[in-house]
Amino acid sequence: MKKGLKFAAASVMVLLSAGVIGVWTIVYLKDSGNEDKHSPEQLAAETNKEPQLVQDYGDTENPEYADAGAFIKEFHEFYNQTTGWERINDLNMPDQIARAEAAKAYAGYFIPLTEDPALKNDLEAITMHADSVIAGNAETVLTLHRYFHDLDIAVNGYVHEQIFGVTESK
């Protein structure tokens, strides 16, 4: 009979523990769903910062670029302005994400039009790295800048003493 009481007591303790854990989980999940949702303007006001602007990067379905070289040149200029000279440490990520979306679309537009296999592979790599930035990976912004830098040298003859060596195009 004592064995039966011990077993019953142990069973009750297990059930009580499971109940406490279950109630705690429900309360926790309910509270985590009540977090304040803020717009960028509200967050900026709370942190005394200006909301970060996002540029319009044109019609990615009908690019205004005459060729891949023009696209590469303009995007390299953008990355020089927004990431060069230590600006990589203070990125406007919403704008970088919008630019990565445009880079992906434009590169995707030029891939089937490109005959050079090395350039085609580089444009495909740009779409892959752009996906990483679109997912919020700020570190990949530097990689995109290096792709556009090296491609600007290889495709457009941009003159610069540093080549990062990330592209197949030479």
Image (spheres, rainbow, N blue to C red):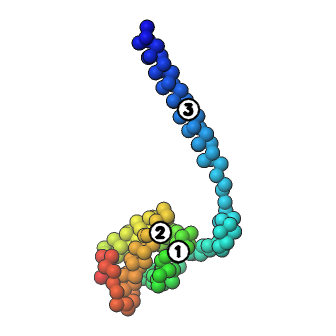
Secondary element at tag 1: loop
Mark closer to the chain start, 3 or 1: 3
Question: Image quadrant for the N terminus?
Answer: top left
Q: Which residue is mark 3?
A: 20
Seen from this angle, which residue lies furthest top? 1
Q: Residue at x 46, y 13 (%)?
A: 5
Seen from this angle, which residue lies furthest front? 2
Amino acid type at circle 2 is Ala
Q: Nearer the viewer, residue 22 or 95?
A: 22
Q: Are marks 3 and 1 in contact (CB under 8 Å)?
A: no
Q: Which residue is mark 2?
A: 138
Q: Nearer the viewer, mark 3 or mark 2?
A: 3
Q: Are marks 2 and 1 in contact (CB under 8 Å)?
A: yes
Instruction: Tell me: residue 36, above or below residue 114.
Output: above
* Residue 43: assigned label: none
Q: Splitting the image into 4 quarters, where does residue 124 fall? A: bottom left
Gap in angstroms between the C-alphas marked 2 and 1: 8 Å
Residue 26 percent location from the top left of the image: 59, 38
Amino acid type at circle 3 is Val
Q: Residue at x 30, y 76 (%)?
A: 168
* Residue 91: assigned label: 1
Amino acid type at circle 1 is Leu
Is residue 105 visible in this depiction of the protein?
Answer: no
Q: Residue at x 52, y 72 (%)?
A: 96
Q: Nearer the viewer, residue 47 or 51?
A: 47
Secondary element at tag 2: loop
Q: Residues within 10 Å of mark 1 (few under 14, many from 20)?
A: some
